[in-house]
Amino acid sequence: MTASRRVRGPGLVGLHVVTGGRSEPSRNHFDFVTTVRISGPGLERTGLSPEQRRVLELCQPGALTVAEIGAYLVLPLSVLRVLLADLMERGHITTNGKFYAVQAADREVLEAVLEGLRKL
Amino acid sequence: MRGSASSNPAEGTHLRGDETIVKIMVAGAFSVGKTTLIGTMSEIRPLRTEEVMTAASVPVDDLEGRPDKSATTVALDFGRLSLSPELVLYLFGAPGQQRFFPILRHLAHGALGALVLVDTRHLAQSYPVIGAVEELGLAYAIAVNEFPDAPRHTPEELRAAMDLSEQTPLVFFDARDRPSSKNALISLASYLLTLLPERTR
C-alpha cells in the first residue's frame, strides 16, 4: 500500500485529531471515503466470492469510494471492508492511500475547499 | 471512461482514484433536513449504506433497555460534490444520538468538521446532537433550517438557548435551496480556516 504515491501529501485530517481525538489509523485502511480502484485487471478471479467479483465489475470503469461501493452493492460497510481487505491482499485493488493519520489539518486543503464551495 | 457493462449502477460517476477526498459531517436530529441538504448539494444521486455496530462496540445502554440487541445498524446517507478536478467533498449524514457514539466516532474520523442542522420547532432536540459533535472533537457551525411554520428567533436567542460560544457560526438557511445550503457550508469552511493557526503546531 505504500507503492507509488503521485498524489499530494495526505493531511486530510479533522481538527479533532489535534485536540486529542484517538488515533487508530493502522488497522482501518478503508475509511468510507477511501477510493478503491482496480490494480490487477488481468488477475485470475477464480477463488473470489460473488460479492468480490461484483466489486471488481463495479469498479471496472474507474474508482469509487468504499461508501459508494457499499451503497450500490447493498453491502454493510463492515462486511465490505473484509471483502476489500482480501481483494487488496490478492492484488486486485488498490486505494488512494489516504488513510487518515494523526497530523494537523492542511491549510491548503481547507482553502481549496472554501474556494471550491464559493465557485459552485 | 468506457464501461464494459452498461448496467453498471455507478456509470458516469466513477472517479480517477487520485483525487483528494474530504468529508464533512451533516449532523442533526431526526427529520431536521440532513438528507435534504445532502440531496440539494450532491452531484450524484444521494446514496445510503449501512454501518453495523456489533455487540463488542455497543455500550451498555440502560435508557434503551434493549440488553439483548447484539448489533445496531446505522444508516449512512451521503452525497458527493466535486470542488475541483482534484478535490472531492463528501457530505454525510448520521444520526446524532449518543447511543450511536462509537460508530459516529468511527465515521467522523478524519472529517473536516460538522454542519449541525437545527429546527427551531424542536430546538431542544439539537442539544444532545451538539453535545455529541463536541464530544467527537469536531469543529462545527450551526445551520438553522428555516421551515415555513417555524417560530422565528433572533440569533442571540438561539445562541443563548444552545449555549454556543461566540465564535461558533450560526446561519439561517433552507436545505432545499442550493445557494442557501452552499452558503451554510461556506460559513463552516471559513470557520475551520480560522481555527487552523492556533490548532496547528
Image: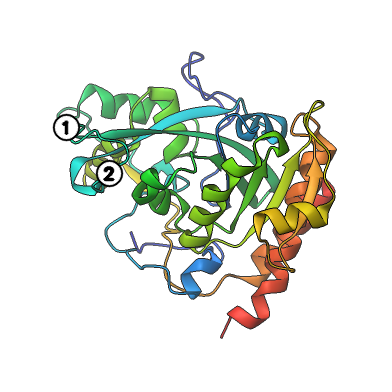
User: Mark 1 sits on what residue?
Assistant: B68
**In which chain is the residue bearing label 2?**
B
For the N terminus of chain A, the quadrant is bottom left
Q: Position of residue A111 (x, y in %)?
A: 73, 65
Earlier in the chain: of badge 1 and badge 2, it is 2
Image point (79%, 53%), residue name: B157
Q: Nearer the viewer, residue B196 or A94?
A: B196
**In which chain is the residue bearing label 1?**
B
Task: Tell me the kind of residue under disc 2.
Answer: Asp
Left or right side of B148 for B192 = left
- Looking at the image, residue B91 lies above or below residue B110: above
Q: Secondary structure at mark 2?
A: loop
Mark 2, other Cα within 10 Å: few <14 / some 14–19 / many ≥20: few
Image point (66%, 60%), residue name: B163
Q: Position of residue B179 (x, y in %)?
A: 84, 39
Q: Nearer the viewer, residue B29 or B82?
A: B29
Which dot marks residue B61? 2
Q: Position of residue A40 (x, y in %)?
A: 33, 41
Image point (46%, 63%), residue name: A5
Which dot marks residue B108? none
- Looking at the image, residue B118 lies above or below residue A21: above
